[in-house]
Image (cartoon, grey):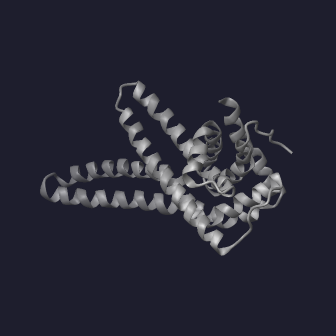
Amino acid sequence: MIKPFMRGLGAYRYAHRLVWKEGMWKHLIIPGLLSMLYFPLVVGGLFGGTFFGIQELSVLIGEKWLPSEVAEWVGGILGFIVGLLGIYLSYLLYRSVVMIIYAPFIGLISETAEEKYHGSKGPGFSIGGLIYDIYRGSMVSILTLAISLFLTVVCWLLWLLPVAGTVIYFIGMIITQAYFAGAAFMDPVLERRRIGIRASLGHSYRHKWHAMGNGAGFMIMMLVPIIGWFLAPSYGIIAAAISGPNTMYDAPKRLGK
């Protein structure tokens, strides 16, 4: 349990080497910029739109049912709370949405990382392959998003339990987000070996601790504003390309060069 988790997490150290010592940084620029724009655009839009909408609603309520001063005060508090919930939901959706945006780049980044680290060559570039990568990356992201949202709702319901519910909620959310992030990052490695989407998700489940370790590194990087948003998805893909191939063997090879 601990060893697979640490293999998935420890691969970020080697991912860092590939990025800055092997010249992979140039592959991160465009997807990194797209990723970094997610929070100011989506979160800002959600928070601002929600706050403005609640304020307008409070004006309407003030005209009909409550004194305007009370309605504005209540509307301000509600707008702030709903806006925070919107930010929280945006964070939960970040990985899936960004992976869909990343779809045209995932295959290239993962294949380049695996070739540089393991020396194994992929099928090479083709328009058909690119289209399939976009399709597959989007499908995997949508599937993992759907399952992740379902489990998130379950965790929210468990939150209603006194004391223990809060603990279960936070642990469940961390495990859920880490696992599905790692599963999505590992998929390009499996796709190059002609493993279907269902089999890929099954493989990730069998190696769930490894996937969680890979996803945990992504979540830790996401805590760093701007830089983390820029680097985290690409680092996750590269780390999975480094450690993911070892999950294909019963006795994983030791990482390190």
* Image point (16%, 52%), residue name: 67
Q: Specify the farthest residue to the bottom.
A: 127
Question: Looking at the picture, does residue 158 appear above or below residue 136?
Answer: above
Residue 28 in view, yes or no: no
Outermost residue, left direction?
Answer: 64
Q: Nearer the viewer, residue 72 or 251?
A: 251
Left or right, residue 111 beside residue 34: right
- Visible residue check, residue 77: yes
250 is higher (above) or lower (below) than 197: above
User: Where residue 88 appears, x then y in whole percent?
Assistant: 45, 48
Is residue 130 rendered to the left or right of residue 63?
right
Looking at this rendering, what residue extends furthest in the right direction? 257
Across and down, in percent, residue 66 comes to 15, 51
Total marks placed: 0
The residue shown at (67%, 30%) is: 2
Q: Relative to the observer, which residue lies in front, 61 or 210? A: 210
Report the residue at 43% width, 41% height from top. 151
Residue at the image position 35 percent from the left and 28 percent from the top: 161
What percent of the width, then of the height, locates residue 224?
62, 48
**Image quadrant for the N terminus?**
top right
